[in-house]
Image (cartoon, rainbow, N blue to C red):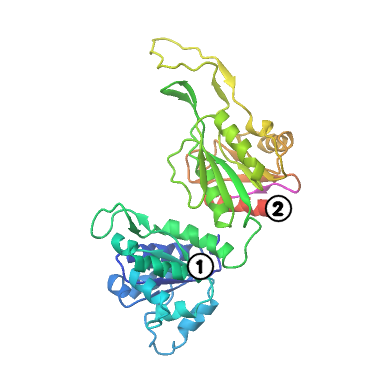
Amino acid sequence: MPFAGRHVVLGVSGGIACYKSCTLARQLTEDGAVVDVVLTASAAEFVRPVTFEALTGRPVLTSLWERDRALAHIGLAKQTDLAILAPATANVLARAAMGMADDLLTALLLARSGPVLAAPAMNDAMYAHPATRANMKTLAARGWQFIGPEIGPLAEGPSDRPGRMSEPDTILAAAARLLVTGGGGGGRLAGKTVVVTAGPTREHLDPVRVLTNPSSGRMGYALAAAAYARGAEVLLVTGPTELPLPLGVTAHRVETTAEMQRAVQALVKKAHVLIMAAAPADYRPATSAATKRPRRNGTLTLELEATPDILATLERPQPCVVVGFALEAGGDGVAKARQKLQDKALDFVILNDALEPGAGFEVATNRVTIIGKAGAPIELPLLSKRDVADKILDAVERALT
């Protein structure tokens, strides 16, 4: 996990979006970070310090004048891996841009030389005001990173302009990436291009009927999110899915296996890593009707033909680490996966069982075996698909030269 063992300062300034900061503090803590929350006086009017203390298990800092903590802001400014400011109100952005240090949070920010991630949250007119934009430009020139704001309902009602603070998951994704790209300790994926395929494909019998499979795309999307968090440029080739697009990735949406084949072939020329996590349809109707076929009683016989085998036909103009998936349904899975590894010139194949409870299609967990060209297979326990993605990327990073 990107936050395990990391020390994070969460600065909370006074806006209604403070309620999201509670979720952010809890998720950071659950992901293994040591979280010190710094509240402004106005933030404490929205959420009491004891709430954050209960969520993080650590005392909350609210004042420069606390007994025995006169230099706490200096220690936190210099010793922590990352400072997150969420919400970042127009007021605190203005004070930080001017170099003010009249409370604990602004003093900490002025003393800090490490990475800062700010999540602006304010009325849409306040965000659009030239003063706010100038303040953000000043802070960006000093190395601050920003996430959001987004368009959505504000405290005063609906809005079609930016102002709403990004959701905690979005802030977490940006924070994880910043720890790699701006906070030191970057892995081998930082600066690399990773192409990931995800989801099913659909092969049309007619305009309203398709051949497909139950793939949700969760595994591929988890891999894309995890690669982005490690500093990679991520190109996601995705079949039809209802999943929200992971933060920071560039999506190439496709419908059929042939479309996925063309997209992968076009993108692989700049890939350092290719991860084929999609579940493309293996067969398509030999003919596809231009209009809806009328329903008839009795049987219907269809003639099917094979879709393109994307990996088997892939031309690789430059060396890259290639990861394939082998979805089996019990019986001699490792041997079949090893054969796929050899036949398709893969560096790794990820074996999982479509019939195992909690693994395979349409679930949030998976249990896989990572099989490489050398060494013993790595059997993982049942994990969340994001945790599985990180284990796969650990293996990929070890293989990168």
Q: In this view, does 173 lie above or below 264?
A: below
Residue 80 in view, yes or no: yes
Q: Which of 45 and 106 is in front in this view?
A: 106
Q: Nearer the viewer, mark 1 or mark 2?
A: 2
Label 1 – label 2 distance at C-alpha: 28 Å
Q: In this view, does 401 lie to the left or right of 302?
A: right
Give the extent of the magenta segment.
375-381
Q: Extreme left residue here?
A: 156
- Residue where numbered disc 2 is placed: 400
Badge number at residue 317: none
State the residue at coordinates (47%, 35%): 240
Give the dominant element type of the magenta stretch: helix, strand or loop: loop
Q: Which amino acid does label 1 sit on?
A: Ala
Q: Position of residue 173 (x, y in %)?
A: 49, 57
Q: Quadrant of the C terminus?
A: bottom right
Q: Is residue 350 above or below residue 229?
A: above
* Label 1 sits on residue: 33
In what quadrant of the picture does the N terminus appear?
Answer: bottom right
User: Viewer-proximal residue, 6 or 208?
Assistant: 208
Residue at position x 42%, y 22% in the image? 207
Residue 258: name its quadrant. top right
Residue at the (53%, 42%) spot, across then down: 359
The picture places residue 388, in percent across and down from the top left corner, at: 57, 50
Amino acid, disc 2: Leu
Rendered view: 351 above or below 181: above
Label 1–label 2 contact, CB within 8 A: no
Residue 180 x, y percent position in the rendering: 58, 62
